[in-house]
Amino acid sequence: MDLNAKIYIAGHRGMVGSAVHRFLKKTGYTNFILKNSAELDLINQHAVNIFFEAEKPDYIFLAAARVGGIMANNTYCADFIYQNLMMESNVIHAAYKIGVKKLLFFGSSCIYPKFAPQPMKEESMLTGVLEHTNEPYAIAKIAGIKLCDAYRAQYGCNFISVMPTNLYGPNDNYDLQNAHVLPSLIRKFHEAKLNNEPSVTVWGTGTPRREFLHVDDLAQACCFLMENYDEQGLVNIGAGEDVTISELALLIKEVVGFQGTIQFDHTKPDGTPRKLLDVSKLASLGWTYKIGLREGLKSVYAEYSTQQLSN
Ligand code: GFB
């Protein structure tokens, strides 16, 4: 991508899109097309086609998506499959029609089977049954990957797919019902500390294992792949290390400085027992993560607590 390339970041206000935007700006890119959902409804195919005809971007980061944690996925399952299918179909087809130079699609590690061998290799996709709490979302994301590969195979489009692990960082969602575990626990421990509560409740058994990657690392990896990867299939992006939810809770408790105890609510779902990505493909291309979990947690907690003070 030359520095004057016209880059459309779909979903630039979300955690992933905003991180890609920050990284590209820092690298020297200046020519962005940014539209919020009120300005461009990506579910509306007609609106998407008009926008692409008028703007003709060179490169696209397709980060727009309906996302959420385990409870949001389980509750809004129709919205998750419908909205994601529509957005990715509309953008990918329009990108083909106007002949963009390259498009990068964001999948999710939940596309792998619930009991996939760990760490999960790219070849594991479509080899087994999905985790039921996020099956509709996962099917929409698998469809997006297949769209990219099909447009590459039939029309020669340079569309690639990346598979991020569980992410955290600036512009995350801290809504207790709909967020992912890491921001939810930051908020729970922070509020418990301020209110001198005796304990914090963590959902599930605490035994599931998850891998976490700072979104600034993800953004850097995506820009690296935009420059260095032109093939079908997906590329995992992760740290290659995981922790149990109990270990995560203890780490957040320590970073926040909460003195009370941790309780587990066994009525809440655990989801997939383990989700650790095999990142050897990305490593062989020449990229590894930089921000460790403790360091990343400290920086997001510093940002979160400062924001709370100013609210
Ligand atoms: O992050 P999370 O919501 O999603 O939950 P998944 C991860 C684990 O943390 C589950 C536990 O075992 C939860 O039960 N957990 C403990 C909590 N306390 C909490 C809490 O306060 N809030 C939340 N949210 N979880 C999502 C998928 O799966 O991950 C999506 O549903 C997507 O489709 C995303 O793939 C990355 O890791 O289980």
Image: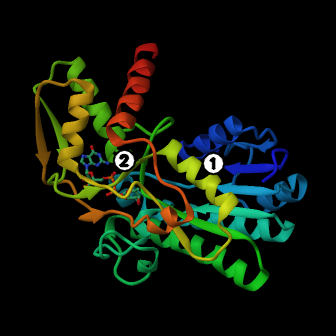
Residue name at image x 23 percent, y 37 percent: 251
Would you name the residue on which mark 1 appears? 11
> Residue 101: x and y, percent?
80, 64
- Visible in this render: residue 32? yes
Q: Is residue 151 above or below residue 14?
A: below
> Residue 129: x and y, percent?
34, 80
Would you name the residue on which mark 2 appears? 180
Classify mark 2 as within 8 Å of ligand 1 or not, answering yes or no: yes
- Visible in this render: residue 64? no
For disc 1, the neighbor class at 10 Å (few under 14, some 14 to 19, many from 20) is many
> In what element is the residue under mark 2?
loop
- Using the image as rendered, state which of residue 159 and residue 294 is in the foreground: 294
> Residue 36: x and y, percent?
68, 42
Q: Residue furthest right?
A: 54
Count of all numbered marks drawn on residues in the image: 2
Quadrant occupied by the C terminus: top left
Residue name at image x 48 percent, y 73 percent: 139
Inspect the image, locate mark 1, and give the three-letter code of the amino acid beneath it: Gly
Quarter of the view holding residue 131: bottom left
Left or right side of 299 for 209 = left
Q: Label 1 to label 2, Cα distance in Å?
A: 18 Å
Q: Is residue 300 above or below residue 3?
A: above
Left or right side of 221 for 41 = right
Left or right side of 20 for 167 = left
- The answer to the question of whether label 1 and label 2 lie on touching residues, with beta carbons closer than 8 A, is no
- The circle on residue 152 is none
Inspect the image, locate mark 2, and give the three-letter code of the amino acid beneath it: His
N-terminal of the pair, mark 1 or mark 2, is 1
